[in-house]
Each structure stands twice: as structure tokens, then as C-alpha cells.
Image: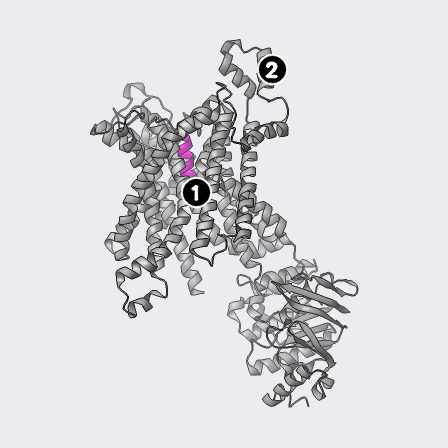
């Protein structure tokens, strides 16, 4: 177990280093002169050649790729994400503020997704291939094909423009979170329904279940004690994927609903060419992602001792 | 099952023949008739510049489906190559390739695509680059997984003993076994690319106006949501139907493969 | 000449082979016998370099064995062929790898010797019988005239009648081609009838190495004697003794 843990952690460290390097390399090789962009952002028309040179030295852009990379990664290891190249403020507090908007949204989306998919999957699998089941599968298939931004626009059209029930843009009141969360939640529900359904069906197919029925174990007990844990394993795997979906969905949804948060923060940072901010978001996303996948690997191991590592 | 394949074929035909089927020039600006409702002349109405929406959708199919095809095929080639190198190239190559794959999987892929396309600047080339870089990993994992399971097959051992080069072994013995599974992955990645292209277009990082790409059209339509909501429905509908058709084709393909496997 | 010099192979925590040594010259046949799990298949893998030896080494004429392009006849005859290819394509593979253009006359001669009808090669592995697949497997092994051919339980997948037939064909081909043959088998009767030498493998060690007649008369080891007596009891050695 300890060896397993060590190898997992080592792998995560390698992957994160690679991710940091890839991110930095992309931004380093981005077209355009970053020093010029910073100078323009700060001093506008006053950005002369001299000013640009000073900015370049200040931002550590004149030292070459590897020194610049190390100068960025070093502080990163102790949680210092650097300063915005436009405003000069520390990036981390701003990212945290953005995160404080995104987190509730993602959580609400996940809860809505679960609230829809769990009952739907359970009812659907009562009678596999029955009309309810087909309905659930159809809904899930269509849901998986609907892009989040279009769904968001449709919801705005219906609930904000047409019916006037809910506010659409911004995040001023708590009612503002309803439509974005619903957009996100419906998307989550589509993929979760599919996975929960096949998870439950697969667990029911386990060869040992008929033996329980023959021995007279109550149906409810079988479902709870034997079907549920088996269905849990694929569901846990999927939470890793769902997390990606939630993060991506949040990015799109925040842009559509003009909501502050990580998505708007990222898109604004890209447009302002404020690379320290972009790097911070990307690296944070990678850390979150890798950590969650690490935990999933561990949970997997605890739930099913037969599995050493996922698809290794 | 058959009907699913037919639907998918219909989209291929549309993507190829779309421009000839279009009743109007998709770039023809017609200010007096801007934001017209659907009519006999303009079947799906016109946009803010009076351009025919149906014609723009049909031309847009070439952008959305064509680019998605290019992206998913490049990803297929890169991913398969990486997976084969991992499976055939020995322990070190395997470790390197798989950690690289993990690294690229460490980002939620649409976010990575947004960052790459955004940082490199809007345009078709950076769009293709962004979605390819973030879309080859699943092929690599599948190719490696099947590749490793082939390694102990008698005929692969025989080929190695005969002194066949790794390239020849990959080409003659691995690729034919990989293709069915890769085809299933490909349908998923094709659908993903369509969604990615339109998402990036919608964010303004993808195909640039006046090109009639579906995501970009949606971005235009959004401004006039209150006055002409229908204008916003059509491009989204096009994306949904395409992705749905492709996903269903992929499901059908996977089922028939599983069926074949069970019978043999 | 094949020279196996003190090889040990590790599998997990235990040793699958321990200090195994022997030599095998061209034109000679060595049968390796033993119970299942004795390390017979590991021995083949080690000789072919498919598993690493953690000590000792294997050479052919003082060079690595793989350099002489040894051939292997597999236990499961069909598994040696890619199910998607015609048998002909698979058979030609050793020649393709060596960039030799196939010689039709040579092929016809081998086919004749192995009693393979000419049109059989155009079928797929699933379309021929196990016995036919076995003979095509031998054809494939011999097509590039290797100096060393390894047989992994060549008879175990076949029925009794086909077994005798195959055993005779292998012996004939060896007389004609003059390769060194290493036959791994659990069939002592077969080993005694067709091999020049018999090596008894037990738990990864060579218990004894004798000429075939000497082994049938008087095995040198207690374990060898037990094996021989068991085979006598089954009537497997009657035609030899």
C-alpha cells in the first residue's frame, strides 16, 4: 500500500511538473511581445522603447526560457503565483475571489445533476428496456449533445426574456445563481444518468446475485448491500471526468451569464494577455484535477482490492 | 441501427454538398431585410446583416464538420503513433509516453483549448492546434492498451522472432487489430471537436467572422436574442443534431463490435 | 551449436530456472521433459530472449541466439498466425524479414514434405484444422532454413492419430534440413522415440541429461526413474524398449 501510494504521488508530481512546463512553454512562445503588451496596458501611449525595456527587465522576460521558467516555478512551489502583469497586484487573492464565485456554482450544478440523474437512473433500471428506460437513455443522449452555452442561452430566453421569472446576467442576488446552476446541472445530469444506469445494470448482472435471491435474501437488502457498492465504482471514476465537465461548463456558463468567476477571469486574462493570471488558473486547474484523480485511484483501491491501478 | 448510419451519411453529404444546396450567397449583405422572420424567400430568416441563415448554416457545415474531421484525424494519427510507441518501444518509451499523456490529461480539455487558442490568437490554425493538442490522448491510451495485450499473442511473438522490424510489426499486426476500437474512439472525438469548435467560436477564439461557423453565428445571434430569438435556435440545433447523430453512430459501432467479439 | 550456460530466470520472488546448462549441435534433437510448472516453457522463452536471464547466458555459435533467427513451433498451432491474414502471408514473414525473395520450388518441396495441399495456404487460420495449422506452423518455422528450431509441446493440441503423423513429419524434416531441434514435451514416449538426448527438468533444475536409450534403460536420477516407470505403466514406452 505504501509503495502504491509513493508511486502514485511520484507520478502525480511528474505530471504536474510536465503540466507547469507545458503551460509556461505555451505562453513563452505566444505570438507578440509580452513586454510590449504589459507596457501598453500600464502606460498606454507613454510606452516608449525605453519603457518597454524596463518592463522587460522588471518582469524577468530578458533572461531566456529556462531561467524564466525556474523563476516562475520556484515561488509557485510555496504557493506564490506571482503578480498580474497588467495591474501588478498579487494574482492569488484575485484567483481566490474568482473561485469563491465558481465553487458554489459548480457545487450547485453537481447537486442539481445528482438530484435529476439518481432518481431517473433508479426508476429507469427498474425495468431495463422498458419505455421509462428508453426515455432516460434518450434524454441522456440528447443532453450529452447539447453544448452548455446553447442550453444557457435557451434558458435565458425562456426564463429571463420570455417568462421574466429569473435574472440572467451578473451575480448580484442569490437568484442569479439559479439559471447558471441549472445550465450546468442539466449537462451533469445527462452524463451521470448514462453512467449510473449502466453501473446499476452491470452490478445487477453480477453472477452471485441470483444465489442471494434463491437463498431468500430480501430484494431491498440485495440492492443496498451488493448492487450499490458495485455501481459505486464506475460512478467514482466518473466523478473525475465530471469534475472536468463542471470546470469547463463553469467557464462557458460564466461567460454566457456574465458572471464573475474563474471562467470570466480566465477569458478576460487571455484577452488582456495577462499571462501570470492565465498561468495561475491553468496550474490551479491541473493541481485540482491531478489531486482528485489521485484520490480516486486511492478510493478505487480501497473499494476493490483486486484493482491495482486504473488502466495501468 | 441502420437508420443511425444513414443519418450520419446524410450529414457527410450535407457537409460536402452544403454550399451547392444553399439558396443564397452566405456573405450577401442585405440591410433592408435584416432580421427577417422565416419566409418562402428566407426559409430560416435572416441575420443582423440580412444574410440568409439557412445558406450560412449549410456553408457552416463545411467549417464545423470539415474542421472537426481534420482535427479528429490528426489526433487519431498522433495518438495511435504515441500508443504504439508506448506498447512496442520498451519500458522507458512506455513510461515517457504515458506520463506525457497524463500531463496532457491533467487539464480539463476545453479549458486548455480555450487557453491555447486564445493565447495563440484567433484563427483557424490555432483552433486546429488547440483542439488537436488536447484531443489525442484517448487514442494513445486505447492503442497502448490493446497493443500491450497483443504483445503476448503468438503471431506477434512469431513476427518478432522472424526479425520483423517494429514498424512492420506495428503496421501489419497491430494496426489492423486496433482500427475497430480506434474508430469508436474517433466518433467520440469527432463529436468533441464539433462541440469544441463551436464553443471556441462562441467565445470569439475560433473561426472568425464573416466565416459562417455555427458557434460564431450563435455569438452574433445572441445580441439580438430579444427581437429574433429564432435566429439563435438554428445554429445550436445544427450542433446538437450533428453531435447526437455522431454519438449514436459511435454507440452503434461499439455495440456491433462487442457483438462480433462475443461471437468469435 | 546452441550453448546454454548456467542460466537462471526469476519469476516474481522465486526462480523459474536455476543454473540450467546444456549444449545442442546441428542435426541433433534434445527433448526436455518434465511436469507442468517445471519451467519448460520458461526455458524456451529464455533461449529465445523473450524473458531476461538474471544470470548465465545463451549463445549460438558464440553469438546471441536471436542473431541466428531461431524458429519456434507453438503449442497452440492457430495462435501462431494472425487471424486477419492468409496463411501464406504469415508463412512468408520470415523471408520478408530477411528480405529474401521466396523461392517457389523450395516452398513446393517443403509443402510436399509436410503434406500441405497447395491451396491450403490461401485460407485463413480459422478455416483449417488444428493438424493442418500445425503443419503450416512447421512450414513457417522452416521456410527461412533456420539452424535452430524450438518445439513447444508440438503434439499436445493434436488428437492421437495426428500426433503420430506430426511426430514422424518433424523427424523427417529434421533429417532433410539438418537443424538442431529442441523439443519441449511432457510425453516421454515421444521424447524417447525421436530424441537423441533427454533432459529432465524439475522445479527449474536439470535433474539429469542422458542419451535417449540410456534414459529408457536406466535413468540416472531417482526422479527420472519415477517418470520412466510412470510412462511404462501407461504403455507409452512399449514401442521404444
Q: Residue at x 56, y 29 (%)?
A: A75
Asked if residue B41 can be seen in this view, the reply is: no
Instruction: From this view, report whether residue B35 is shown above or below residue A209.
Output: above
Magenta part of the protein: which range? Answer: B193-205
* Residue at the spot of label 1: B190
Estimate the x, y position of residue A145 in percent, counting from the top left. 35, 41
Q: Along the horizontal axis of the image, is B103 left or right of B13?
A: right
Along the line of sight, the residue nearer the viewer: B20 or A73: A73
* Residue at the spot of label 2: A53
Estimate the x, y position of residue A120 in percent, counting from the top left. 27, 49
Disc 2 from disc 1: Cα separation: 46 Å
Instruction: From this view, report whether residue A47 is shown above or below residue A76.
Output: above
Crowd band around label 2 with a 10 angstrom C-alpha radius: few (<14), some (14–19), many (20+):
some
Estimate the x, y position of residue C152 in percent, counting from the top left. 63, 72
Asked if residue C40 can be seen in this view, the reply is: yes
Along the line of sight, the residue nearer the viewer: A277 or C105: A277
Amino acid at each position: 500500500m505504501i509503495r502504491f501510494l509513493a508511486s502514485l504521488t511520484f507520478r502525480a508530481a511528474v505530471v504536474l511538473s510536465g503540466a507547469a512546463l507545458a503551460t509556461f512553454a505555451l505562453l513563452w512562445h505566444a505570438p507578440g511581445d509580452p513586454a510590449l503588451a504589459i507596457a501598453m496596458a500600464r502606460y498606454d501611449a507613454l510606452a516608449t522603447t525605453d519603457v518597454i525595456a524596463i518592463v522587460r527587465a522588471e518582469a524577468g522576460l530578458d533572461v531566456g526560457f529556462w531561467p524564466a521558467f525556474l523563476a516562475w516555478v520556484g515561488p509557485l512551489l510555496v504557493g506564490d503565483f506571482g503578480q498580474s502583469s497588467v495591474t501588478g497586484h498579487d494574482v492569488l487573492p484575485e484567483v481566490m475571489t474568482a473561485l469563491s464565485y465558481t465553487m458554489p456554482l459548480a457545487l450547485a450544478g453537481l447537486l442539481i445533476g445528482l438530484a435529476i440523474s439518481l432518481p431517473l437512473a433508479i426508476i429507469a433500471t427498474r425495468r431495463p428496456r422498458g419505455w421509462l428506460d428508453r426515455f432516460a437513455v434518450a434524454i441522456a443522449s440528447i443532453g450529452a449533445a447539447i453544448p452548455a452555452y446553447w442550453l444557457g442561452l435557451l434558458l435565458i430566453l425562456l426564463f429571463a426574456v420570455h417568462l421574466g421569472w429569473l435574472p440572467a446576467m451578473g451575480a448580484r442576488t442569490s437568484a442569479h445563481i439559479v439559471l447558471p446552476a441549472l445550465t450546468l446541472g442539466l449537462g451533469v445530469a445527462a452524463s451521470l444518468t448514462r453512467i449510473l444506469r449502466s453501473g446499476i445494470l452491470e452490478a445487477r448482472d453480477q453472477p452471485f446475485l441470483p444465489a442471494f435471491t434463491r437463498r431468500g435474501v430480501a430484494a431491498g437488502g440485495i440492492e443496498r448491500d451488493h448492487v450499490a457498492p458495485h455501481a459505486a465504482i464506475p460512478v467514482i471514476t466518473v466523478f473525475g471526468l465530471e469534475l472536468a465537465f463542471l470546470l469547463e461548463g463553469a467557464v462557458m456558463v460564466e461567460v454566457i451569464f456574465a458572471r464573475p468567476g474563474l471562467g470570466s477571469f480566465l477569458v478576460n486574462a487571455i484577452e488582456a494577455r495577462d499571462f501570470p493570471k492565465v498561468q495561475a488558473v491553468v496550474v490551479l486547474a491541473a493541481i485540482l484535477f491531478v489531486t482528485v484523480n489521485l484520490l480516486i485511484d486511492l478510493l478505487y483501491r480501497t473499494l476493490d482490492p483486486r484493482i491495482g491501478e486504473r488502466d495501468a | 441501427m441502420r437508420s443511425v448510419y444513414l443519418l450520419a451519411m446524410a450529414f457527410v453529404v450535407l457537409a460536402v454538398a452544403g454550399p451547392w444546396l444553399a439558396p443564397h450567397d452566405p456573405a450577401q449583405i442585405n440591410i433592408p431585410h435584416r432580421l427577417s422572420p422565416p419566409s418562402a424567400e428566407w426559409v430560416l430568416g435572416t441575420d443582423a446583416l440580412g444574410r440568409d441563415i439557412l445558406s450560412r448554416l449549410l456553408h457552416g457545415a463545411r467549417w464545423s464538420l470539415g474542421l472537426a474531421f481534420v482535427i479528429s484525424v490528426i489526433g487519431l494519427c498522433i495518438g495511435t503513433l504515441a500508443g504504439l510507441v508506448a506498447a512496442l518501444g520498451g519500458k522507458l518509451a512506455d513510461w515517457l509516453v504515458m506520463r506525457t499523456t497524463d500531463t496532457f490529461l491533467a487539464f480539463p480539455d476545453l479549458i486548455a483549448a480555450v487557453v491555447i487558442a486564445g493565447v495563440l490568437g484567433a484563427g483557424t490554425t490555432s483552433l486546429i492546434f488547440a483542439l488537436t493538442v488536447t484531443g489525442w490522448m484517448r487514442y494513445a491510451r486505447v492503442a497502448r492498451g490493446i497493443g500491450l495485450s497483443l504483445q503476448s499473442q503468438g503471431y506477434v511473438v512469431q513476427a518478432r522472432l522472424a526479425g520483423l522490424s517494429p514498424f512492420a510489426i506495428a503496421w501489419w499486426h497491430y494496426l489492423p487489430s486496433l482500427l475497430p476500437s480506434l474508430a469508436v474512439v474517433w466518433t467520440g472525438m469527432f463529436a468533441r471537436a464539433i462541440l469544441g469548435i463551436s464553443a471556441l467560436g462562441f467565445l470569439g477564439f475560433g473561426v472568425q467572422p464573416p466565416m459562417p461557423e455555427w458557434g460564431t453565428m450563435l455569438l452574433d445571434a445572441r445580441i439580438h436574442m430579444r427581437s429574433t430569438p429564432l435566429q439563435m435556435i438554428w445554429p445550436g440545433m445544427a450542433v446538437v443534431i450533428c453531435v447526437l447523430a455522431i454519438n449514436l453512430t459511435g454507440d452503434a459501432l461499439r455495440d456491433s463490435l462487442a457483438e462480433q467479439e462475443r461471437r468469435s | 551449436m546452441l550453448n546454454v550456460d548456467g542460466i537462471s530466470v526469476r519469476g516474481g520472488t522465486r526462480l523459474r530456472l536455476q543454473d540450467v546448462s546444456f549444449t545442442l549441435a546441428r542435426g541433433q534433437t534434445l527433448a526436455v521433459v518434465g511436469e507442468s510448472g517445471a519451467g519448460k516453457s520458461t526455458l524456451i522463452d529464455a533461449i529465445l530472449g523473450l524473458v531476461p536471464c538474471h544470470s548465465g547466458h545463451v549463445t549460438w555459435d558464440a553469438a546471441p541466439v536471436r542473431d541466428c533467427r531461431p524458429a519456434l513451433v507453438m503449442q497452440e498451432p492457430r495462435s501462431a498466425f494472425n487471424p486477419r491474414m492468409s496463411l501464406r502471408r504469415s508463412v512468408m514473414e520470415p523471408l520478408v524479414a530477411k528480405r529474401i525473395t521466396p523461392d517457389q520450388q523450395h516452398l513446393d518441396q517443403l509443402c510436399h514434405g509436410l503434406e500441405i495441399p497447395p491451396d491450403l495456404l490461401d485460407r485463413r487460420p480459422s478455416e483449417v484444422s488444428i493438424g493442418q495449422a500445425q503443419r503450416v506452423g512447421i512450414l513457417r518455422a522452416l521456410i527461412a532454413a533456420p539452424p535452430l528450431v524450438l518445439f513447444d509441446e508440438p503434439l499436445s493440441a493434436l488428437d492421437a492419430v495426428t500426433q503420430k503423423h506430426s511426430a514422424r513429419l518433424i523427424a523427417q524434416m529434421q533429417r532433410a534440413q539438418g537443424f538442431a531441434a529442441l523439443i519441449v514435451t511432457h510425453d516421454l514416449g515421444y521424447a524417447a522415440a525421436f530424441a537423441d538426448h533427454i533432459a529432465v527438468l524439475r522445479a527449474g533444475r536439470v535433474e539429469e541429461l542422458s542419451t535417449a536409450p540410456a534414459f529408457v534403460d536406466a535413468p540416472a536420477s531417482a526422479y527420472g526413474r519415477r517418470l520412466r516407470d510412470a510412462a511404462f505403466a501407461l504403455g507409452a514406452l512399449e514401442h521404444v524398449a
